[in-house]
Image (spheres, rainbow, N blue to C red):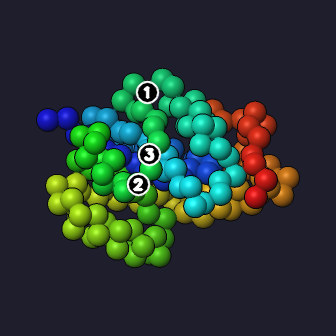
Amino acid sequence: MKKIAVFPGSFDPFTIGHEGIVRRALSLFDEIIIAVGANALKKSYYPLEVRKAMISKVFKDEPRITVDHYEGLTVDYCRDKGAGYLLRGLRTSADFEFERAIAQVNKALVSEIESVFLLTVPEHTSINSTIVRDIIRSGGDASIFVPAAINLKDYKGEEI
């Protein structure tokens, strides 16, 4: 049976930390679906289609990675896609506590889906989308925090 993992997130924007987790996870899974969560209650900086385009550009040469989006429960999306694993990255102990609680609830909802956590490499620990977004919004150069394939000047964010 194929080992399929879903890597869910808002990815607003996708960072080098996200990229690192996905690339390292390729040794564990046959296929990874990067699933951009669409949350109507949350205003994003980059529109959904722009975030998907950014991520697709990063992995354009990797056939085992697909980029998609979803609404609703992540475990329902996993079940619909035949994915047995949820992939998450951990930067800090606070991330662990938050992700552990979600993983336990997901396990209670759909027992056959396993959550798999990968620690970020130390140099990516301080990088998160909120900080990167703040740099961009303030007119700074955030290019060192996003994958090389993404040229932020090609993408326009929405006003928040």
Dot 1 and dot 3 residues touching (CB under 8 Å)? no
Q: Which residue occupies the extreme right position in the image?
A: 139
Tag 2–tag 3 contact (CB < 8 Å): yes
Determine if residue 15 is in view: no
Figure check: 94 above or below 119: below
Q: Position of residue 22 (x, y in %)?
A: 43, 44
Using the image as rendered, state which of residue 72 and residue 84 is in the foreground. 72
* Disc number for residue 62: 1
Locate residue 51 relative to residue 65 in the image: left or right.
Answer: right
- Helix, strand or loop at disc 2? loop
Using the numbered discs, state the Cα–Cα distance from disc 2 to disc 1 in whole angstroms.
27 Å
Give the CA distance from mark 2 to mark 3. 7 Å
Residue 43, by quadrant, is bottom right
Callout 1 environment at 10 Å: few (<14), some (14 to 19), or many (20+)? few
Q: Quadrant of the N terminus?
A: top left
Q: Earlier in the sequence, mark 1 or mark 3?
A: 1
Q: Quadrant of residue 137?
A: bottom right
The residue to which callout 3 is attached is 70
Tell me if residue 149 comes above or below residue 19 in the rendering.
Answer: above
Q: Nearer the viewer, residue 105 or 16?
A: 105
Q: Is residue 124 left or right of residue 62?
A: right
Q: Which mark is residue 72?
A: 2
Name the residue located 31 percent from the left edge and 35 percent from the top edge: 31
Amino acid type shown at disc 2? Gly
